[in-house]
Image (cartoon, rainbow, N blue to C red):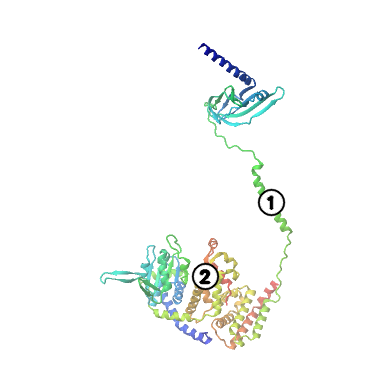
Amino acid sequence: MQKRIILQRIFLCVLLGYLCPFRLLAQDHYQVKALADTDKIRIGEQVKLELSAKVDLNQLKAASLRLTFPNLPDSFNHWEVVDRSKLDTVTNAGNNETFFKQTFTLTSFDSGRWDIPALRFDVFSPAGMVDSAFSQPIGIDVNTVTVDTTKAFKPIKSVRTVAWNIWDYWLYMAIGAAVVLLALGLWLYFRKRPVKEKVVPAAPLEPVYDRTLRLLKELDAEKVWQQGNVKEYYTRLTDILRTYFEEQFGIAALEQTTAELLQNIKPVTILNQQRDKLRALLSLADLAKFAKLQPTPQEHEESMHKAVEIVEWTKPAAKPAEAQNA
Amino acid sequence: MENTSQDIRQLNEKIHQASAFVDLLNIELGKVIVGQRYMVERLLIGLLAQGHVLLEGVPGLAKTLSIKSLSSAINAKFSRIQFTPDLLPADVVGTMIYNQQRNEFVVRKGPIFANFILADEINRAPAKVQSALLEAMQEKQITIGDTTFKLEEPFLVLATQNPIEQEGTYTLPEAQVDRFMLKVVIGYPTKEEERHIIRQNLNPDGMSAINPVINPADIVQARKLVREVYMDEKIERYILDIVFATRHPEEYKLQKLKPLISYGGSPRASISLAWAAKSYAFMKRRGYVIPEDVRSICFDVMRHRVGLTYEAEAENVTSENILSEILNAVEVP
């Protein structure tokens, strides 16, 4: 039994002898630290937590060790991680030390005193974890906003005016500039475009009055009714007269029936004086054109005479009008 | 066969004599109808041209009195059908009813079996009733059960539309409206005419009675003569120019009308215009048509056959405005 106890103690001593130097070696070669930039914040404010480790890199490399930083969850113990920086490394060549540093931005929305617990840094050998180091826990007060209830309520603040920034209006300014450029371009285009020469209507070669008389004479000379074309004779005769009224007196005679035309010549006094003659002529012409009436040769000639007389009668009115047109 | 000048002279004389009844009718109708000569004239045109008339006007303008008086003056049978939303086609054309004594179905003819029909407020009845009436107007026959009945000649339908109320009405579709030869828009009488109307209605002896001056057979005979009225090819071309100008206004230097017209007059418009012009010439106791006849009747024949676009409606342009423009642009022969 005694022998067995002795053997157990020897085994324990051997085991400790094997492990202790390694642990001592490891702890000598690194130091870890957690540091907050403040010990009190208001709800929602942020606190910077800096985790750092000072390492003798040569020793660690010689022992084939690897140090890992604690992995903070997004939310822990009333704290929320807002941001986490990358691991920063600074090497001091003089004493062969290397600093590792990582900064976390934390915030809390619960009032009270909340601890950032001791964070564990692990040291790994190729065979597995061999050691851990813990930072000191940090207590931070999270305070609510103090309200002075003795003071009166203050009115709601009005909308704050944001300072005018030119870039807020760049689109409008670009459109405005484009419109101005377009207008300028169009102005330049139309200014440089050759101006069309104003077409001056050529003076009529032949006065309306003279032309009408000539056409009537030509119709008479063609002997249209003598050849049996009574309808054509009266159609041409009335068309010549209607065209004359249209061009000379501005009466749309070509688009008016006999009754309408007789009604519309009333304001033209000189023409209205020949109303009965015109009515007789147009009525006979209507019968010849639309009722196949065959007037007598005497009626044909009378119709021509009436037409010429009407034109001749209106000559005093026609001449000044032509002079005015010319 | 081509008419010679001699034929037309004879025809003119014949028509001059045969159309004398028009004056008699006007005198007889003038006993009870004050003013509204325009409407009465259009009714006679429709009667002589075998067309039907759609009347548009506010209530109380003697529409019923006019057609009733015309019917009495011609000694013809008159029916009035008040169109309502619950009217059925059988209420118009008739139906088969069971005779218990004889143990068989017998035909009961509807009010459409008359010479003159006043279809009052036609747009109040649903489409199937309108369709039944319009079919009878077109075919001039009615089928009830297995039997087809020819409608008696003359057969004239005068339909009225109230232009004010639109709610609860069934507007006649364009295809149905086209079946009416004339659409007459009537207005109020003048102050003097209305004074006569008051006196006539308050007369202690009552209104004068209308005496028959002609028979339906005379109208049928007159219709044959209307068909014979001479229409020169120049007038035919004038009619075609007017109708084509409603379809292709740009070809008549009326480009501005193009966006205002959704559809122009149909071939039925050309036929109706020719018929109505002949009828008008007959009433003026002439045996030939002159451009005045075409122009006088043009608005009544064409106003419901020119479709307006939304643009025209937005600009308050009416079919009458368009027709005026066309008549002022198309050359008279």
Please tell me the numbered disc located at residue A180.
Answer: 1
- Residue placed most toward the observer, A86 or B20: A86
Q: Chain of mark 1?
A: A
- Residue placed most toward the observer, A297 or B171: B171
Q: Residues within 10 Å of mark 1 (few under 14, many from 20)?
A: few
> Residue A133, position in %: x, y?
59, 22
> Residue B237, position in %: x, y?
56, 76
Which three-letter amino acid code belongs to the residue tagged 2?
A: Gly
Q: Secondary structure at mark 1?
A: helix
Which three-letter amino acid code belongs to the residue tagged 1?
A: Val
Can the viewer see residue A158?
A: yes
Q: Residue at x 73, y 65 (%)?
A: A197
Left or right: where A199 falls relative to B135: right
Please tell me the numbered disc located at residue B204.
Answer: none
Quadrant for the C terminus of chain A, please.
Answer: bottom right
Say yes or no: labels 2 and 1 on the same chain.
no
Q: Residues within 10 Å of mark 2 (few under 14, many from 20)?
A: many
Find disc 2 in the rendering and name its residue. B265
Left or right: where A160 falls relative to B45: right
**Vertical arrangement, residue A140 with respect to residue A4, above or below:** below
Can the viewer see residue B190?
A: no
Asked whether the residues under the numbered discs 2 and 1 touch, taking CB atoms below 8 Å apart as contact, a structural biologist would say no
> Residue B77, position in %: x, y?
37, 74
Residue A154 occupies quadrant: top right
Left or right: where A106 falls relative to B155: right
Q: How many marks?
A: 2
- Residue placed most toward the observer, A266 or A325: A325
Residue B146 occupies quadrant: bottom left
Q: Secondary structure at mark 2?
A: loop
Residue A144 occupies quadrant: top right
Q: Chain of mark 2?
A: B
Left or right: where A64 falls relative to B94: right
